[in-house]
Image (tube, helix red, strand yellow):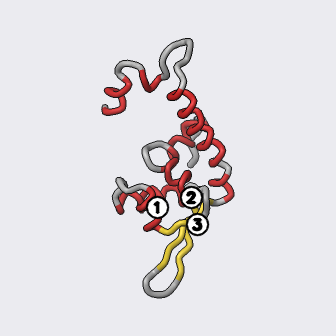
Amino acid sequence: MKDLVSRCPIEEAMQVLSGRWPTLLIYYLKDGTKRFSDLRRDNPTISHKMLALELRKLEDAGIVQRTEFQGYPLRVEYDLTPAGTTLVPLIDSLGQWWETTSATPEASGPPVHALPGAQAQRNA
């Protein structure tokens, strides 16, 4: 039974996109098809297990499509779905925002990531 209380669409989107890996995986898939090993190479600090879990989560959300090819060895490729492709401009904008705010000091003060305590909050 569906919840009687409607959830915020941002909250629902963040359930899928939150964490360290989902936006990075979308970023690396924006240029086209990648195999599992390609994504591991792009993200050398992600574990095999975590990459599999994150790709499965994005697949379940309809953002990533997994294509399995028969034969030995088994070959699996990942692509963005049309819904996943619509996220690319948002992720590109996020990168542009970071480059802009981290490169030029603002008249109103330092960027959020430079505020005292920001590192402590990130490590918490």
Circle 3 is placed at which residue position?
Answer: 33
Q: Which amino acid is tagged 1?
A: Leu
Q: Which residue is mark 2?
A: 29
Q: Quadrant of the C terminus?
A: top left
How crowded pointer 2 is (Cα within 10 Å; few <14, some 14-19, many 20+) is rated as many
- Tell me where residue 93 appears, x and y as whole percent: 62, 38
Give the secondary structure at mark 2.
Answer: helix
**As drawn, is 36 to the left or to the right of 64?**
left
Residue 95 in the image: above or below residue 88: above
Relative to 25, 87 lies left or right: right
* Quadrant assignment, res 52: bottom left
Give the vertical position of 110 relative to 124 (above or below): above
Residue at position x 53%, y 76% in the image: 68
Q: Nearer the viewer, residue 100 or 56?
A: 100
Q: What secondary structure is marked by label 1?
A: helix
- State the separation of the CA atoms marked 3 and 1: 10 Å
Q: Label 1 neighbourhood size at 10 Å, few (<14), some (14-19), many (20+)? A: some
In whole angstroms, how far apart are the C-alphas of marks 2 and 3?
6 Å
Secondary structure of the residue carrying numbered label 3: loop
Mark 3 vs mark 1: which is more N-terminal?
3
Identity of the amino acid at label 3?
A: Thr
**Rendering coords of residue 25 (x, y %):** 50, 54
- Indicate the position of residue 86 as horizontal and vertical percent values: 67, 50
- Residue drawn at 48 percent across, 87 percent down: 71
From this view, report whether residue 124 is shown above or below residue 17: above
Work out whether residue 90 or residue 5 is closer to the camera in this orientation and state it.
Answer: 90
Q: Is residue 92 above or below residue 32?
A: above
Identify the residue under disc 1: 39
Which residue reaches farthest top? 108
Q: Mark 1 vs mark 2: which is more N-terminal?
A: 2
